Amino acid sequence: PVSLSQVAQSENFRFFGNVRVGSDVSLRELRDTYDAVVLASGAPGEKSLGVEGEDLPGVFSARRFVGWYNVHPDASDLLVSPFLQRGDQAVVIGHGNVALDVARVLTKRVEALEKTDISKQATDALRNSKIRHVHVMGRRGPAQASFTNKELRELLHEDGVVAAVDPKEFEKGMTNASREEIKDSRAKKRSLELFEKMAENWGRVESGSLDPDERVVQIRFLLSPVRIEAGDAGGLGVSLQRMTLEGAAGAQRAKGEEGAAGGVERLGAALVVKSVGYAVEPLEGLPTSGGKGKSPPVPHTAGKVEVEVEVEEEGDDSKEAGGRTTTEEKTLCPLFVVGWLKRGPSGV
C-alpha cells in the first residue's frame, strides 16, 4: 500500500490546511475549479436527545467530551473538572463503543491513564474526580446493543473497575424475538456471555461490598431519558422512562411501559454524557437525506452524487423593454462521497 507521505511527495499533490468548506470557500467554487471533488469530511456534527434540559451545564456530547481528554482544538474551552467533583454518579447515554470509552476514562485508575496518550489536563482533573459509579444506558436490550466484544471484554478485565449488569434488566431485554435475532450470530452470542459475566458481579454492587478504591460501570437496558433537570447541590437529575420491546425479530421497537409495571426512574448525576451518534453537518450544494430511516446521509449511486445542472440567464427578459433572455446550461464537475458521508456514521 502507498502511504500518505509517498503521495505527498508527488508533484501533482497540493495540501491546503486551515480551510473551512462552506465559509472560506464554497462547494460550488470547488466544483467550478476542479475536474472532480471528493468529500471525505465524515460526520462531525452530533445528534441530540430532543429532551428538556440537555443543554444544561454538566451535560456534554461524547464528541466534545472525547475532544476534551484528547485536547482537540474544538474542545479546548470545555470546562469539565468542576462537574467531576459534584457527586459520585455519572450517566452516559448510548450503547456503542464511544459510550464505553467515556465510561472507562471516568473510572480507570489515573496511574493507568497516565501511560496512555490522554492529555495531562484530563488526568489532573480525573485525579480529583469523585465519580465512583457510571451508568451506561440505552433504550433497547442486550441483543440490540452495539458494543464490540473486544470493548466489553476489556471492560470486564479493567483493574479497579467492576463491570456490572442487573440480571433483572438483562432478562427483561431478552425477549423471544431477541433470542431469535441472535441465534445465528456467534458474535452476539459471545456478547451475551460477557453480559452474563457482568451480571455475576451484580450482587457485590447491590450489596455495596466493594473495595474502597473500586469503581463501577453498570450497563443498563430498556431505559430512555425523558428529562434532565438541575438537581440538589449543583448536580443533575435524570428522569428515565422504563421501556419494553415489541415486534418481530429484526424489527423490535422500544416502547414506554404502561400501567403498574411502568413508570419513571430518577437518577442523580454529577454529569451526563450523550453518546447517541454523529450527524452530517449541512453544506450548501450538498443534498442530504435528512437522516430518515437507514438511508445514507447523502443520496448517491456507488459514491457518486447526482450531478447538478445550473441554468444561467443573461440579458434583459423584460418584454416592455423589448429585451431577450438567453440561457446557458452549466454542468458542474462530478461530486463523490466516501466514508461516513457515504454510508453513515458507523464503524471506523
Image (cartoon, rainbow, N blue to C red):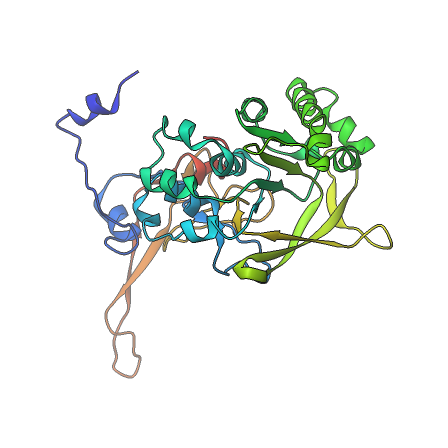
Q: Please report the residue visible at 21 percent of the width from the left and 42 percent of the height from the top.
A: 17
Q: Nearer the viewer, residue 287 or 204?
A: 204
Q: Nearer the viewer, residue 200 or 205?
A: 205
Q: Position of residue 285 (x, y in %)?
A: 37, 53
Residue furthest left as drawn = 11
Residue furthest front as drawn = 212
Horizontally, is 280 left or right of 151 in the view?
Answer: left
Horizontally, is 256 left or right of 314 in the view?
Answer: right
Q: Nearer the viewer, residue 103 or 319?
A: 103
Q: Quadrant of the N terminus?
A: top left
Q: Can you see residue 305?
A: no
Q: Position of residue 342 (x, y in %)?
A: 45, 37
Q: How many marks?
A: 0
Residue furthest top as drawn = 1
Quick check: 263 above or below 92?
below
Q: Quadrant of the C terminus?
A: top left
Q: Position of residue 337 (x, y in %)?
A: 39, 38
Q: Please report the residue visible at 30 percent of the width from the left and 50 percent of the height from the top.
A: 27
Q: Position of residue 272 (x, y in %)?
A: 54, 50
Q: Quadrant of residue 174?
A: top right
Q: Can you see residue 215?
A: yes
Horizontally, is 58 left or right of 144 in the view?
Answer: left
